[in-house]
Image: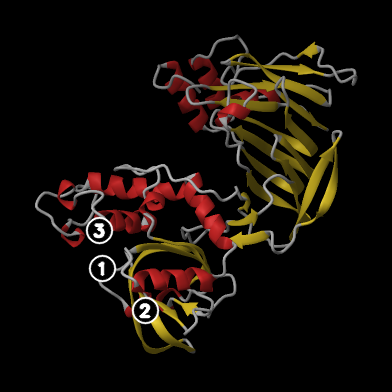
Amino acid sequence: GSCYGMAVTSILANAGIFNISDWQTGSEYLREIEPISKDTNDDTESLINYYFLTQFTTEIQQAVAENAYKDDSVILSELVQSLENGGNPALVCFSGKLYDKLNGGHAVTAYGVEKGSWVKDGLLCTKRILIYDNNYSEFSDNACIYLNDDCTKWCIPIYKTGSVYHENDHINLASSDISLINNKGFINGTNYSSDSGFISKMTSESDNFNFSISKIKEVDGSFSFNGAVDTDEIKIIYPMYADSENKEFSMLLRDSTSGYQYTADNAEAMNISMEYLDSMYEVNLSNGKSVRFTPDGYVDIEADISSFEIKSTFNEDMCNLPWYTVGVSGKYADSVKFEQTEQGFVMSGDNLVNIIVRANSDDINTSAVFSTSAEKVLIYSIDEKTIGVSADTDGNGSFETELETGSMGDIDGDGNITSADALKILQSVTNLSQLDDMQSCLADIDGDGMVTSADALRLLQYTVGLYDEL
């Protein structure tokens, strides 16, 4: 599960970035390090896992995005040329369908090129890129990347992946650039930078491909379609990690200044995220129809009596509140809009009853619950630990009515969070009493949409000081 970390640490060891003997006394080669187990090599496992996570840094993700707009033949030709000219071992990541069925990816280390003649699954190959594959303890011929003469066709037989097998299989990354590979690294880490423009990314965790993506633009507070997304602008990629349950895929969108709308052919469960240079959004819907995003802080959803959760996250210089992430969740909605303004977040919708607001920054996690018959509210900061909500009850555009809010965990409404509140949750779980809708919102401490004994446990742990915040 840590293939990327294994590949990266192997390259860094080869480059002399760290000494192998530092991780196991007396070892000179990586192969001499004892196998990782629950009782040994905690430091080694920790190092590998740290570097596994570096693939999620913006710099690596943008390098992957840039490669998505290159043909595999160009990427592989450049890799072959570098290795043939004595270049350093390279990090190679590929994704698509593995073993003809599994959406995902893998990371390996390329270290040389051999010429010859091989036939692999009907492809006549004249060269192969030699691969150290961390999934195997010994060299495997079928783990190599096999290429035809001009690198326009490729395959990795052991994974049944490559252009020979599937049109969308892709080389995500092929680089020997240590400044990129060791970006934000634990040992002598670098701060990689690129002159390429930012590529925005929309990610879906659904396996439904019956949807459309359109550009949108805002004029005087109204949105209009700005045309379909060109096929040259959008690229679909799979993550560089594999999971038997993985349904995730991403749509890279070249124009990062545009707003985008995702529309499903039929209402469905949606888990959609959108990443821009300075902002990121997450939307979860139980029965959604469409989602719209813009880079300056606007999200709206259309649904069919759906539960919803919307989160907006901004870089520090884009935040208008003390928190860099603010999210709202609720139920039974057909339409919700959530937009950052200078005063805070304006939320509008057809059912603003029992809405949970959560906000956080590095050191602060806070929340509130409100209900109103109004269709529009302003969510703002009273102070860094207190969320305020005011409503536009007369529809004149001003938020003149301050709403009463409940505090997460204060089930009995006495203004204090005590073991008595945890007892009320447990009584509800065991059917000794019932919580009303507002109390159920206040009792959902872990935010999973259910009230369970886990919520009571977390609340009790908070009351005895094991947690500083709920």
Do callouts 1 and 2 mark residues in contact (Cβ within 8 Å)? no
Q: State left or right for residue 108 relative to residue 330.
A: left
Q: State left or right for residue 53 relative to residue 416.
A: left
Image mark for residue 137: 1
Q: Residue at x 74, y 31 (%)?
A: 339
Furthest residue in direction left, as rendered: 26
What colouring method underlies this structural image?
Answer: secondary structure
Residue 200, x across and y down, in percent: 63, 48
Q: Secondary structure at mark 3?
A: helix
- The amino acid type found where label 1 is placed reads Ser
Task: State the separation of the CA atoms marked 3 and 1.
Answer: 18 Å
Do callouts 2 and 3 mark residues in contact (Cβ within 8 Å)? no
Task: State the separation of the CA atoms marked 1 and 2.
Answer: 14 Å
Q: Badge 2: how crowded within 10 Å, few (<14), some, or many (20+)? A: some
Residue located beneath label 3 in the image = 14
Q: Nearer the viewer, mark 3 or mark 1?
A: 3
Q: Is residue 170 visible?
A: yes
- The amino acid type found where label 2 is placed reads Asn
Image mark for residue 272: none
Q: Is residue 342 above or below residue 264?
A: above
- The amino acid type found where label 3 is placed reads Asn
Q: State left or right for residue 354 relative to residue 168.
A: right
Q: Is residue 196 above or below residue 175?
A: above
Exactly how many numbered labels are in the figure?
3
Q: Secondary structure at mark 2?
A: helix
Q: Is residue 371 visible?
A: no
Q: Secondary structure at mark 1?
A: loop
Residue located beneath label 2 in the image = 142
Task: State the separation of the CA atoms marked 2 and 3.
Answer: 24 Å
